[in-house]
Image (cartoon, helix red, strand yellow):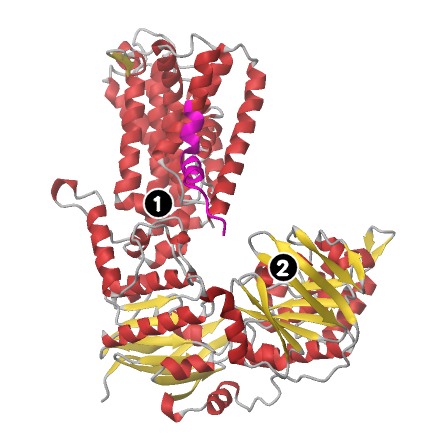
Amino acid sequence: MAQQSDVGKFINRYAIFIVLVVMIVVLSFLSPSFLTAQNLINVLITESGRGILAIGVAFTIISRGIDLSVGSIVSLTSVIAASLVQEPSYSARIFPNLPLLPPIVAVIAGLSAGTIVGITNGALIAYTAIPPFIATLGSMIIARGLALILTNAYPVPMLRPEFKIIGQGLLGPIPYVVIVFALVALIAYVILSHTRFGKNVYAIGGNVNAARTSGIKVSKNLIAIYAVSGFCASIAGILITARAASGIATLGNNYELDAIAAATIGGTSHTGGIGTVPGIIAGILILGILNNGLLLLGISPYLQQVIKGVIIVSAVVFDMRKNARQK
Amino acid sequence: MEDYILEMKGIVRTFPGVRALNGVDLQVKTGRVHGLMGENGAGKSTLMKCLVGINPPDSGEIWLRGKKVTIPNPYTALKLGIAMIYQELNPVLERSVMENIWLGREPMMRGAAGFLVDHKAMYEQTRQLLSELEIDIDPKIKVKELSVAKMQMIEIAKAISYNADIVIMDEPTSALTPNEVKHLFDMIRKLKERNVAVIYITHKMEEIFQIADEVTVLRDGNHIITEPIEKMTIDSLISAMVGRRLTEMFPKMESKIGDVKMSVRHLEVPGLLHDISFDLRKGEILGVAGLVGAGRTELMEALFGLRQRSAGEILIDGKKTDIRTPADAIKAGIGFLTEDRRLNGIIPVLSVKINTIVANLAHYTKFGVFLNHKKISKDCEEYKERLKIRTPSLEALIQNLSGGNQQKVLVARWLLTNPEILILDEPTRGIDVGAKAEIHTIITKLACEGKSIIMVSSEMPEILGMSDRILVVSRGQITAVLDRKEADQETIMRYAAAKYNNNQVA
């Protein structure tokens, strides 16, 4: 009954962005090296991979699902792509007789692998009706297993420079990885807000019965949603591998949790139907700046984890209160 | 041949163990309102679910505008011009009005941008649609901001946007205020002018006589009659529905009303309830009437400690009590049968037995740990007999019982705690007429045994037929306490709407 003031509404609506700005301001005062171009670019580089992951995962969360397999997809993509672009001079190559392939082949192979895992997830969820948590838990373990089998748990080093440049190159002052992150975010924004597929994602998460009675093909859309998530994860896998200059089967360990955390902090609701790309980006930046700031302030990395956990839970509590109050 | 837009012939539909529809016919004319009546379980909703493709029929034919059709899913029904407004409305709450209306067929940009949704066009088309139907709602507002009545209007607009010429409404007025009902009826008349046929499912007699042109009655999955409404009376409708005259729907017995059992003084719940004071006597049935959302359930929750009061006191037998939690309330001798069985009452996947004793487990333990199964079975058997609970066995899962029998199990649950005061919130909602009469008998017997009963109900006949006194709640305040003799439907409705009149009704 009580009418909320306009200020209250504004704060509620933009809380996540306000938090981000406040963090930046506070850290600028606390640490002189925080607000420098190089440091901020470093934050962006570090978070680009997980940011792309978070955007993909957000599609599944908005549709009232989850994707636990994205971290493993990063690993799988990493070793597949890396194994196709090792220096021919390196004696312990995964494929010793491989001819010199253009790096694009490696990229396409990596992206395909991730997308295939995603499609499999979607098909399982759509046609067997097992919960997304279980389906993607299974594929998470399987994908990691495949990555380990392919490499025997050894790293895949000595990548060719034409491939590494994806992760290490610059356009002016801005690294390619950051540009890719920005592009993915932009495309995801357009898809979610301005295409029919985007509307379907929200409708399926908001009320699957309404979606079905409106003639939306829920199964096909679910497959597409998890394919998007897998595809995004494999983009992240390529970028991270190229930057690390090595394929590693354990590269993406726990990344799925960071991605889910970022999407959640950014206001993506696990009850489905709610979430925006700007929110997710704010979420990933908050996590990234927090990591970076705590590091600059010399706070123990173990304490950092505690702080991160508290922030994630607080974000959800706040979000639920916000949504409850609007009812 | 008459001008039937829809003919359903010999529709049969079985579910495991039940023949829900037994060769039912339905004929609906263009531009008319066709009332569909029957008790719960008569097959009304099942028949409509056959029509809109949620549960396609096992056999039988559907003819639409003179052509035979098959409808395998709701989307096909929509494309054929059949839209259903479900009782449980089905919008995507977090999205805007316009996105809900055009869900799955959004207007797209032209040319190269053809993969993008054209929000401007969507907005314009929605505005046009709504203004045509004289619905004053902002297309961009999120659906969750709307009242139930407005959500219904949006569903109707959506139906029209599909060019539906058959619109099915399943108990559309169950959550509406009288004003909103009037508005809905205006809307239905507008639909008629557009030559839309409306199939109107309800169990409310007065509505059928106000709005319907023809009426069809189903009973136990069989077609009983179809008649123009002028040929029917309330009596003939009821006897068609239940197959017998219902003389004993409200078998109220005169009980001896004793001293004041509970007094509520100046109870306050911020934003919901204001200055609530009343007395409840021994052996009395106190009916609580009011519109949906007036705060009746909230009041009961406050009495039972489910909602924190900011001021006011509750006296039981003249003594002040401090009820803060349901455990306090149970200790003070209060039992509470909640409004929504599925949500707050039954535990669907557990047995009848466990559901009966779950509020009273402490009484059935040996050494405070192990369950005394013998005693449990004895008591459950006793209440099964006493309340005439129809279940294959005490081990059957409660979800397999009919609504009426589930309700009886819940009554048994509370009686086992031996309450002096029993709060019943909508005790007969969603259960069939026969079971209703049985529940009413149980309630009046309990009052005769000296228990004090508070009965919240939205069904006027139930309030009038069962209560000794009637408390009317309007917007969180008590606007009247009426004696059985001075109460009638109009008086109650007037007091129920009292606090809404000055301000706008949502």
Residue at image location 40% in from the left, 56% down from the top:
B146
Residues shaded magenta: A1-21
Q: Position of residue A127 (x, y in %)?
A: 40, 50
Residue at the left extreme, as displayed: B111
Would residue B246 appear left or right of A103 to someone viewing this image? Answer: right
A14 is higher (above) or lower (below) than A30:
below
Front in this rendered view, residue A80 or A11: A11
Which chain is disc 1 placed on?
Answer: A
Residue linked to disc 1: A201
Residue at the right extreme, as displayed: B367
Residue linked to disc 2: B275
Q: Are marks 2 and 1 on the same chain?
A: no
Q: Position of residue B246 (x, y in %)?
A: 57, 88
Q: In 3D space, how far apart are the residues under numbered discs 2 and 1 (Cα atoms)?
A: 47 Å
Residue A42, located in which quarter of the rendered image?
Answer: top left
Which element carries disc 2, helix, strand or loop?
strand
Q: Which amino acid is tagged 2?
A: Asp
Front in this rendered view, residue B72 or B305: B305
Q: Which amino acid is tagged 1?
A: Val
Q: Position of residue B131 (x, y in %)?
A: 24, 61
Would you say the magenta stretch is mainly helix, strand or loop?
helix
Residue B227, located in which quarter of the rendered image?
Answer: bottom left
Which element carries disc 1, helix, strand or loop?
helix
